[in-house]
Image: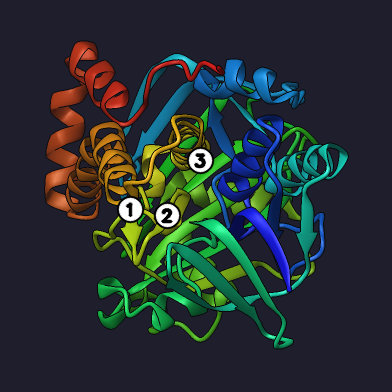
Amino acid sequence: MDSFDIIIVGGGLAGLTAAIHLKLKNYKVAVFEARQYPHHKVCGEYISNEVLPYMEFLGVSLPRTVQINEMLFSTVNGKTLKAQLPLGGFGLSRYTFDYLLYRRAIALGVLVIQENATSVGFESDNFSVLTESGTEYTSKFVIGAYGKRGMLDKELQREFIQKKSPWLGIKAHYKLDSFPNNLVAIHNFRGGYGGLSKTESGAVNFCYLVSYESFKKEKDVDCFNKNVIAKNPYLNLFLNNAEMLFAQPQAIGQISFYKKKPVEKHILMCGDTAGLIHPLCGNGMAMAIHGAKIASESIHDYIKNNSVDRHKLERDYERQWKQMFSRRLWMGRQLQSALLNEKISNMAMGILAKSPYLVNKLIKSTHGQIIEGQ
């Protein structure tokens, strides 16, 4: 039976970031990730500049060929609002970003096991992790970073997994050279909204969130694009002029924005596994990375100080996580509710168009400060 200091379930942004951080502190780390790298994921693929110093600390050099400093909102009927992004960001596909992190982790000696973890048990202050092949691994700590929802959520009987999740995410890359490099655009349509921004390859990422109630009225993605999304004049122009680069759009269902607990049965959760920010806030990637940093530092401090009170570690981690992200998650929920109500969103656009100060405050409320490495 293989034993590790830390096992990380999930090899996305949060999982790989935590693995690199903890390996740099000389711990024996394993990551469970069933999918082979590199691969695409349903994601907005805009990332705030707040992550850059921390990425440098981890030894990960990111391509920043697409610098983004402007945001455009539009309502269903095409009413618009433009704003500058105070901190700015850049476009980077998950295909590239995850693969860069994976290669860095492997180079440092992290063991990446290409299997799903099917159960996590905790007894006598140690974890046992069982995989789908029936292999058992043990560790002192487990970090949950397996994304928006996974088989472990059911096994752990997490509260949110019992509730119906009415959201569907769709993503594809498109070729449209005329799309501005410096822009991230959020466009509303009936029952949802979508984001457009360029990635490091020059492709435009179009990722949208839609309610099942709205989507099920159409028979497939093509029909939904033509009959619903194209009602927004900006998205109609985009779809008529852009060439899809994927053979088929990617989709993910059962996306839940219900509150989650940062600690479940002694597992430290981070990234979307701990709490999912609404895509229109454009900061989910940075939050996943920051959450992984907090989890890694919490574990390192616990070991370094020869602590024996695991409950204190869990309480401290939960407090830090909530302090850093709860307000942003709450603001994301309020913004989504407002923008999906056509009457309210039109009224809000009118008010915000006259107040750059309010716009700036709203953007800052969903973004964090510069994340330093240490």
Q: Can residue 245 be seen here?
A: no
Q: Where residue 83 appears, x then y in whole percent? A: 37, 19
Q: Estimate the spatial distance between the alpha carbons at disc 1 and disc 2, rounded to whole Å.
A: 5 Å
Q: Position of residue 126 (x, y in %)?
A: 49, 64
- x%, y% of residue 134? 70, 88
On screen, residue 168 above or below 319? below
CA neighbours of label 2 inside 10 A, class few (<14), some (14 to 19), many (20+) = many
Q: Residues within 10 Å of mark 3 (few under 14, many from 20)?
A: many
Name the residue located 73 percent from the left edge and 74 percent from the top edge: 1
Q: Secondary structure at mark 3?
A: helix
Q: Position of residue 345 (x, y in %)?
A: 19, 43
State yes or no: discs 3 and 1 in contact (Cβ < 8 Å): no
Q: Nearer the viewer, residue 233 or 59?
A: 59
Amino acid on which the number 1 mark rests in the picture: Pro
In this view, the residue in front, 325 or 243, is: 325
N-term mark: 1 or 2:
1
Q: Is residue 258 left or right of residue 140?
A: left
- Sort mark 1 into few (<14), some (14-19) or many (20+) by Cα contacts within 10 Å: many
Q: Is residue 240 above or below residue 66?
A: below
Residue 306, quarter of picture: top left
Residue named by callout 1: 262
Q: Which mark is residue 292?
A: 3
Which residue is pictured at 68% across the width and 47% down the height? 94
Q: Nearer the viewer, residue 252 or 240?
A: 252
Mark earlier in primary sequence (3, 1): 1
Q: CA distance from mark 3 to mark 2?
A: 9 Å
Q: Is residue 332 above or below residue 87?
A: below
Residue type pointed to by label 3:
Ala
Disc 3/disc 1 C-alpha distance (Å): 11 Å
Q: Which residue is mark 2?
A: 269
Q: How is the image coloured?
A: rainbow
**Circle 1: element type:** loop
